[in-house]
Amino acid sequence: MNQVCCFMVGLGEKHREEDKIFVRFRVERNACFTSPARVLIKVRAEDYDNDALLGKLRDATHERNWWRAQSILRKHRFEVTIKINNVDETMLHLAVGEGKNYFIQKLLISIQNEELIEEKNIKGQTALHIAALVGNKDAAELLVKKRDNLLYVKDRLGKVPLHIAYTTNHISTFAYLFEATKTAGELLSKYQDSFEEFIIRLIYRKEYGEFVSS
């Protein structure tokens, strides 16, 4: 039988008692606690403030509001590639995934150290992996133009963006990445047995002509 423990998390001394957060979770009987318990955990106020700011950066990305994002970055001296959620995504990851290509252009212009474009999320995916995953060809072109080494960065499963576009059937994105990746044939060699199925999928989705013309 499971029991419920309630943890009260304080948000720093400057917050009122009623502002505290209660987090509930289950533990096994005879585990660390044998009955419901309440534990006060102090969280620094500045940590809470940073979380709020990261939330504003997420909102600015969703809204494609570059000027708001830029203002927050400058005022608080955040890196453009700061991780803004609990899966280690940057604004670049989010913007690519949501097709905010104007926002992507502004982000890329602001990133002076090109190596930072290769920042990965918790799955080891760069923004180019995300472009391949969602089929955002325009974003893929922007990213590769800025940092072509992204084509060869592997995620935690050992896959480069070309693999992702291949397995998710995003044909136009795959065609672009295939052309841009110098070692495409070698990278796709392990998929040769299913290449015929891939062509069938192209025809099924009525994108075959687009792929050939690429």
Image (spheres, rainbow, N blue to C red):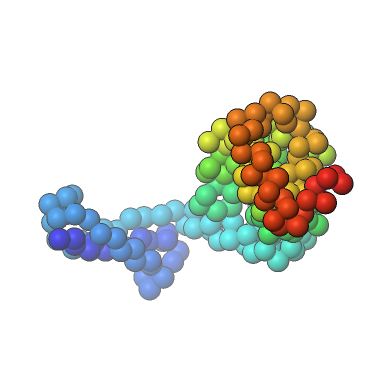
Comparing 134 with 29, the one in front is 134
Q: Is residue 178 above or below residue 209?
A: above
Q: Quadrant of residue 42?
A: bottom left
Which of the image's four quarters has the C terminus?
top right
- Residue occupying image coordinates x 75% and y 57%: 206
Q: Picture coordinates of residue 43 (x, y %)?
A: 41, 54
- Residue occupying image coordinates x 64% and y 44%: 197
Q: Quadrant of residue 108?
A: top right
- Residue occupying image coordinates x 63% and y 59%: 58
Residue 142 left/right relative to 69: right
The single residue placed furthest to the right in the displayed view is 213
Which of the image's four quarters has the N terminus?
bottom left
- Residue occupying image coordinates x 53% and y 36%: 157
Residue 24 left/right relative to 62: left
Comparing 148 with 43, the one in front is 148
Q: Picture coordinates of residue 211 (x, y %)?
A: 80, 47
The single residue placed furthest to the bottom in the displayed view is 18
On the question of residue 177 being in view, the answer is: yes
Comparing 107 with 173, the one in front is 173
Q: Is residue 92 above or below residue 184?
A: below
Q: How many marks?
A: 0
Q: Picture coordinates of residue 156 (x, y %)?
A: 53, 36
On the question of residue 96 being in view, the answer is: no
Q: Is residue 181 above or below residue 173?
A: above
Comparing 71 with 149, the one in front is 149
Q: Picture coordinates of residue 172 (x, y %)?
A: 77, 49
